[in-house]
Image (cartoon, rainbow, N blue to C red):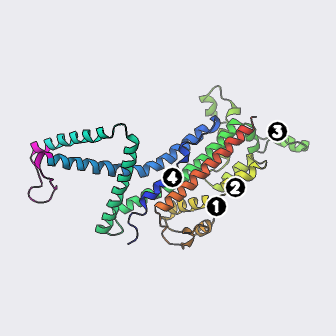
Amino acid sequence: MEDPTFGFAKAIGFNHGFLTHKASEPVREAFDAFKSNISRIDSLMLAPIYISFFSGLFERMRCAGEVRVTNKIVMPGIGEDHDISEAAAESVVEAAKEIRSEYFRKWKGKERELTIFSLNMGIHGVEQVMVTAALSQGESNPVMDGVGSVFASMIVNAWTAFEVLAEDLWVSALNARPRLGFRAINAEIKDKESEEDREKRLNKCFEIPAWMIQEDPNFNIHNNMGTLLREQFDFRKRAKVIDAYTAVFFDNPYKSNVRRILSDPKLDWVSAVRHAIVHYGGKVYKSRISRSFKGLVAAHTELGKLEPGDMIPINGDLVCELVTVVVNSGIELLDFVDGWIKNNPR
């Protein structure tokens, strides 16, 4: 039997540098949303870990309470003496509460140590449950299926977080620097262009929804260029995201830099695995309308070996790797947009 824990502990080891990274005011809201989205991915892992730790801890406290009251540990549902009297049960609850208070008093002032301890013990607890489930029920069981679903959700949510960040940063940049909005619709006046071309650019139009003005009588178009123009680009498709960015950051070296960030082949790995999870039940797919899974992941040492129809082995190593790709690319894109705004005050 292969590792029944799927490398569970490794999934939480992705890059957490986003927690301390800084962003300036124009892009702070976009980056805060990204941090929240990635933190929720963390929570998908932390929830079962802490549940494992605290449920195991409180069960041991209950057992200790039983020993204090009855001088034995009662095994529920086994044997004739699996029940204790109602009065004894109440005494056990009170004893367990006393033990709990004693236990946490010893950790007072050592909150960081308690966090590390609970994480390590919680991970160990989850892994032991997975091993036990695999031994008793085989490799296909609700526990392992559940962990696999958590891993899949982490990858899907990571890709969504990156898509949202790319859109939000683009909008924030245009809202902060309105001339980027004119670039987006090809309306920026250029030096040494013909009168005819100049006239065409000056006559470019875009719509302002009535509700924006109704909700805000002081609506300022200069501070909302990104908000107004976001619908003109499909930020759910990375090729269109690249088009949106290169349309406004078209002067070098900015154009080449942002294209490099958004065209990173490692992002293809995340996109391909996410697409396989959402649309093909986690299997390697072929596509007639876009690049196939094998084409997107060819450079990956493990994914590149898979054939159409194979189930993608989603484990802790892969989750850590792909979420780290998203975090690193997200921070790099943030720094790019933030830097452009700082270097272009108008």
Count neighbours of disc 4 (C-alpha within 10 A) and say few if under 14, some if 14 to 19, many if 20 or more.
Answer: some
Report the residue marked by disc 4.
157
**Front-most of 68 and 122?**
68
Rendered residue at 34%/62% (across/down): 130
Q: CA distance from mark 2 to mark 1?
A: 9 Å
Location of residue 20 in the rendering, given as x and y in whole percent from the top left corner: 55, 42
Mark 4 or mark 3: whose residue is earlier in sequence: 4
Tell me the residue at 47%/63% (across/down). 314
Whether 291 is among the magenta residues is no
Disc 2 crowd rating (10 Å Cα; few below 14, some 14-19, many 20+) is few
Q: Which residue is mark 1?
A: 265
Residue type beneath disc 4:
Asn
Mark 2 and mark 3 in contact? Answer it, CB < 8 Å.
no
Relative placement, left or right, of 192 versus 12 is right
Q: Position of residue 201 (x, y in %)?
A: 82, 42
Residue denoted by label 3? 202
Is 46 on the left-hand or right-hand side of 73? right
Report how far apart the C-alphas of labels 1 and 4 lie in the structure.
19 Å
Give the dominant element type of the magenta stretch: helix, strand or loop. Answer: loop
Q: Which residues are drawn in magenta?
A: 68-90
Q: Quadrant of residue 292?
A: bottom right
The answer to whether residue 303 is above or below residue 74 is: below
Q: Taking the image as drawn, is residue 205 in sight?
A: no
Q: In front of the other: label 1 or label 4?
A: 1
What number is the disc on residue 260?
2
Quadrant of the image containing the N terminus: bottom left
Label 1: which secondary element: helix
Q: Secondary structure at mark 4?
A: helix
Callout 3, which amino acid? Leu
